[in-house]
Amino acid sequence: MKEYHTYENGLKYKPDYKWPSPETERQCPKFEHTLELVEDKPSYYGKPWWCYKCQYQFSEEDFPDMKCPSKESAVEK
């Protein structure tokens, strides 16, 4: 019979991202439009902020000095 091992504290699959209040707004660092705030549900494992143009997620920890990792070119103003 094989021996098996369990982790003492279990495995954590959902990171503890700080979720902002629903009224909070953030701007995309590259395209400067309002990011979408995703609802904090137990079944959701991503970051709170979503950019539909960059197709990238951001967390509160990424602000304020973040740069968008998208490879798309910025829209000219």
Image (cartoon, helix red, strand yellow):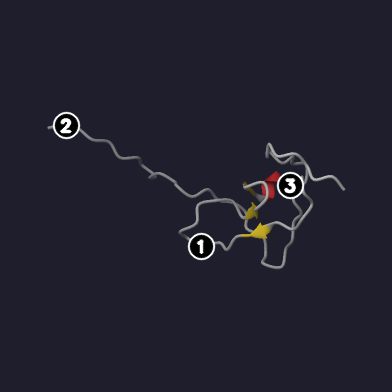
Q: Which mark is residue 2?
A: 2
Q: In the figure, is residue 8 to the left or right of 48? A: left
Q: Residue furthest bottom?
A: 23
Marks 3 and 2 close (CB-CB < 8 Å): no
Density class for disc 2 (Cα within 10 Å; few <14, some 14-19, many ≥20) is few
Indicate the quadrant containing the N terminus: top left, top right, bottom left or bottom right: top left
Q: Which mark is residue 63?
A: 3
Kind of element beneath mark 3: loop
Density class for disc 1 (Cα within 10 Å; few <14, some 14-19, many ≥20) is few
Query: Where in the figure is residue 49, as x and y percent of width and height?
Result: 65, 54
Query: Where in the figure is residue 63, as x and y percent of width and height?
Result: 74, 47
Residue type pointed to by label 2? Lys
Kind of element beneath mark 1: loop
Question: Which of label 3 and label 2 is nearer to you?
Answer: 3
Residue type pointed to by label 1? Lys
| Mark 3 / mark 2, whichever is N-terminal | 2
| Mark 1 / mark 2, whichever is N-terminal | 2
* 44 in relation to 30, above or below: below
The tally of labels here is: 3
Query: Where in the figure is residue 66, as x and y percent of width and height?
Result: 74, 41
Q: Which mark is residue 41?
A: 1
